[in-house]
Image (cartoon, helix red, strand yellow):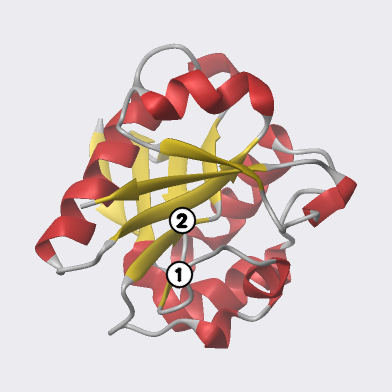
Amino acid sequence: MEIKRATMKDLEQIADVEKECFPAAEAATKEDFKKRLYYYKDYFWLIFEGEKLIAFVDGMVTNQKDLTDEMYKKAEMHDIHGDWQMIFGVNTRPEYRKKGYAGILIQEAIQDAKKQGRKGLVLTCKDKLIPFYQKFGFVNEGISKSVHGNVVWNQMRLSF
């Protein structure tokens, strides 16, 4: 297993993993990821098995306290000096789930956010994943303003 940051060379695999993990209405497109990689490639955490991408976490940094739908499409909103690390996706190929890879990447994102002096991390999730994120210290703040993919999301925050 190798953990690394993303480059544009990883675009195809990132888009493929996203398609395996989210329904079409919720999944970021290849073009979305191209923009994200352009603006904040250092805020992608990836795990590879050999040459195969098996899991990744990504998200921008911002001074906005809450995650909004606008952030998903406007990668240029990334602010390297922002207070909050947003997490847009925690993706693991189905055949690699329940092996701890997502947790490893979440821990990497948490440690990086601490080192960078952020106030914390924010993500949204469906009800069934609340206990998973609580294990890392995230607190459920209730229903998110986000209606991304026409789904009800919970906003979770880990404050330092």
Disc 2 designates what residue? Answer: 58
Vertical placement of 31 versus 144: above or below?
A: below
Q: Quadrant of residue 1?
A: top left
Q: Nearer the viewer, residue 112 or 95?
A: 112
Of badges 1 and 2, nearer the viewer stands 1
Q: Secondary structure at mark 1?
A: loop
| Any part of residue 9 in sight | yes
Position of 26 with respect to 20 (left or right) is right
Q: Residue at x 28, y 84 (%)?
A: 81
Q: Residue at x 59, y 79 (%)?
A: 35
Disc 1 designates what residue? Answer: 60
In space, the residues marked 1 and 2 are separated at their CA atoms by: 7 Å
**Place of residue 91 in the rendered image (x, y in percent of width and height, measured from the top left):** 54, 38
Position of 75 with respect to 132 (left or right) is right
Q: Quadrant of residue 128?
A: top right
Vertical placement of 47 versus 86: above or below?
A: above
What kind of residue is marked 2?
Asp
Q: Which mark is residue 69?
A: none
Total numbered circles: 2
Vertical placement of 48 versus 80: above or below?
A: above
| In the image, farthest residue toward the left | 115
| Any part of residue 54 in sight | no
Task: Please rate how many residues cluster around mark 2, counting C-alpha atoms within 10 Å: few if below 14, some from 14 to 19, many from 20.
Answer: many
**Place of residue 58 in the rendered image (x, y in percent of width and height, measured from the top left):** 46, 56
Q: Secondary structure at mark 2?
A: strand
Q: Nearer the viewer, residue 126 or 112?
A: 126
Q: Residue at x 38, y 13 (%)?
A: 99
Position of 148 with respect to 62 (left or right) is right
**Place of residue 155 in the rendered image (x, y in percent of width and height, measured from the top left):** 57, 46
What kind of residue is marked 1?
Met
**Place of residue 43 in the rendered image (x, y in percent of width and height, measured from the top left):** 36, 64
Q: Residue at x 44, y 47 (%)?
A: 57
